Amino acid sequence: MKTTQHVPKTTREAKDTSAKKDRRPLFFGLGFGILFGFLLHKGGATKYDVIVGQLLLTDFTVLKIMLSAVVTGMIGVYLMKSLGWIKLSIKGGSFGMNVLGALIFGVGFAVLGYCPGTIAGAIGNGYLDAITGGTVGIVLGTWIFAVMYPRLKDGILKKGDFGDITFPQLMKVNEWVVVVPAAVLIILILVWFERAGF
């Protein structure tokens, strides 16, 4: 004799609601990703000449975009945290991770003239160098790192482990004691760039 388990309606509704809530961050991520790509394009950061100009210190467009993003993100994230809208989950790090990541990022950036974000934007623009070299580079680089990760995770990636600490935690001060001066400093640098004609 076949028995069926009765699931109360409220339990089913709770599961349905939680499933819907789980998908919402994906749509937010997609929306912000499209907006980010659009702004990168409008700022000129998806153009090879602009990226190379930054590397040669003749065009500071990319640096200005990144500093603007840092100050906006820093204020936005800590404001949302202060209002109780979000809870930060800090990822641990190490000097080994930073050095290896910087080398991989820097070599790819210098050779191709794009970073992962600007490659996506350049592909969207239909730039052939990004479509060929960028796509192959991202896929191949991801595969190589995935293959090597088991050997790296307990070696170089653990060197100089500093955990999941932030500057405010390290200094034992309120977050805004770090955020406000850092934001003011970045804004002053941006103003100086504009006045100096960079």
Image (cartoon, rainbow, N blue to C red):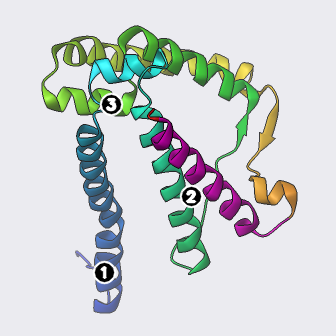
Specify the label residue 96 is tagged with. Answer: none
Q: Which residue is mark 2?
A: 74
Mark 1 closeness class: few <14, some 14–19, many ≥20 residues within 10 Å: few
Mark 1 secondary-structure assignment: loop
Quadrant of the rendered structure where residue 74 is? bottom right
Q: Marks 3 and 2: in contact by CB < 8 Å?
A: no
Q: Quadrant of the C terminus?
A: top left
Q: Amino acid at mark 2?
A: Met
Evaluate whether residue 86 shows in this view: yes
Q: Amino acid at mark 1?
A: Gln
The Cα atoms of the two marked residues, 1 and 2, are separated by: 50 Å
The Cα atoms of the two marked residues, 3 and 1, are separated by: 52 Å
Which residue does the image show at 70% across and 44% down from the upper left?
92
Q: Is residue 103 above or below residue 25?
A: above
Q: Residue furthest left?
A: 126
Q: Which residue is mark 1?
A: 5
Evaluate whether residue 6 shows in this view: no
Q: Amino acid at mark 3?
A: Thr
Queried whether the magenta region covers residue 194, the answer comes back as: yes
Extent of the magenta region: 173-196
Q: Earlier in the sequence, mark 1 or mark 2?
A: 1
